[in-house]
Image: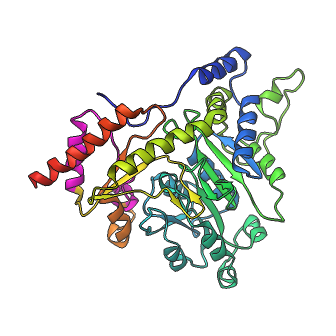
Amino acid sequence: MKIPFSPPYIDEAVINEVVDSLRSGWITSGPKVKALEEEIKVFSNAKEVLCVNSWTSGAIMMLRWLGVTAEDEVIVPAYTYSATALAVLHAGAKPVMVDSGEDFNISVDAIRKAITPRTKAIIPVDIAGFPCDYDRIMRLVNEPEIRNLFQATSLVQEKLGRILVMNDAAHSLGAYYSKNQRTGCETDIAIFSLHAVKNVTTAEGGAICLNLPEPFDNAELYKELRMMSLNCQTKDAFSKSKAGGWRYDIVGLGMKINMADVNAAIGLAQIREYPELLKERKRVFNTYSKAFADCDWAILPPSEDGEKESSYHIYALRIKDFTEEQRDRMIDEIAKSEVAVNVHFIPMPMLSFFSSLGYDIKNYPQAYENFKGEISLPIYPQLDEEKLDFIIKAVKDAYLKVTVDR
């Protein structure tokens, strides 16, 4: 039985929505993008939502809007996908990496130790869809001592008066941060990824959730950023296409990162079905947890803690007391059964580019500990009981093969 790792969920509703976009004669940014923004806004309770062409470009734009420079620092976890730090570099600032906790997410204690007068933003990451401790993080940046340490170097920073918190929510659309509140509104800015492998996809895409405190006007900021995402052009293509509407102006240094309607159509169909799809992801997650609960070698990933609940994006199984080499052998054994698994993530200091910049994995022991035994299992609605049984058997057999042969 051949089982892929993360195929997109494409049903007739998705196909019909895309066909509707194609037949409309309007396939770039237009009514379906706006409709998707409204759906995500309602779903997440964010004040405003702007859809763009990727999480990465959205993060770059928001850091540029914040006004970071080469002298500024942005705190990120060492244990995350590279885009988190690459966005900081593309925006012109310096990523300051800190260690993780045992739940994979950024250590709040490590954040505190890393803050300097140059710190302009913190980008926590909801690894695998499990929310970070945002109550502690937001309290931290609002502490009088931390606010007094903050040195604004742009008008936006002066207006905010403290370190910005921008949640990398790439994995966590649909997660609960509190009993009745999903992620997307718990920080100043949250950005969802809508990439092909995500719970809700637009093939490529991202959604910026705006929740800036007063005196910011999030509705006005949405308009500003929407224009910024279109090269700071005063009219979008839809407006320009109307009779007599050709004249426009360029009023700043923008980016070309808008989402197209043909992409938004995929996500629009999916998010309308998402509550049910989320239940199916939880079913798969819980099936794994039940199957591995009696294995003394298995460290199960977090799913619920108090009022927090995962979006069930990744099932990040860890093998207790394994070395990297043993983990890799286990993955090779699983692959012999034609079950595709993955690893989330190789800590950034272990990647050649970041290593060349001076980052050293020895400074992030928990990040390495989380990584060295981690194997991500397939998790998506299309996995029925037969397929799950097959995957579970392949994993257990692979563990026995590696441990018997060692």
Q: In percent of the image, x 57 and y 62: which residue is there? A: 123
Question: Left or right of 212: which side holds 271?
Answer: left
* Residue that protrudes farthest toward the left in the picture: 405
Total labels drawn:
0
Observer able to see residue 328: yes
Using the image as rendered, state which of residue 288 and residue 105 is in the foreground.
Answer: 288
* Residue that protrudes farthest toward the top in the picture: 23
Give the position of the N terminus as an image quadrant: top left
Q: In percent of the image, x 69 and y 43: which residue is there? A: 40
Question: Left or right of 63: which side holds 375?
Answer: left
By what rule are the colours in the image chosen?
rainbow
Q: Quadrant of residue 296?
A: bottom left
Q: Is residue 328 magenta?
A: yes
Q: Can you say whether 141 is above or below 202 in the image?
A: below
Where residue 287 sits: x, y (%)? 41, 45
* Residue that protrudes farthest toward the right in the picture: 244
**Magenta-colored span:** 325-354
Where residue 330 sits: x, y (%)? 22, 48
Where residue 150 sits: x, y (%)? 66, 78
Observer able to see residue 4: no
Using the image as rendered, state which of residue 333 and residue 295 is in the foreground.
Answer: 295
Q: Can you say whether 364 is above or below 230 in the image?
A: below
Give the position of the C terminus as an image quadrant: bottom left
Q: In percent of the image, x 87 and y 27: which residue is there? A: 245
Q: Can you say whether 113 is above or below 158 in the image?
A: below
Where residue 309 sits: x, y (%)? 56, 56
Q: Is residue 353 magenta?
A: yes
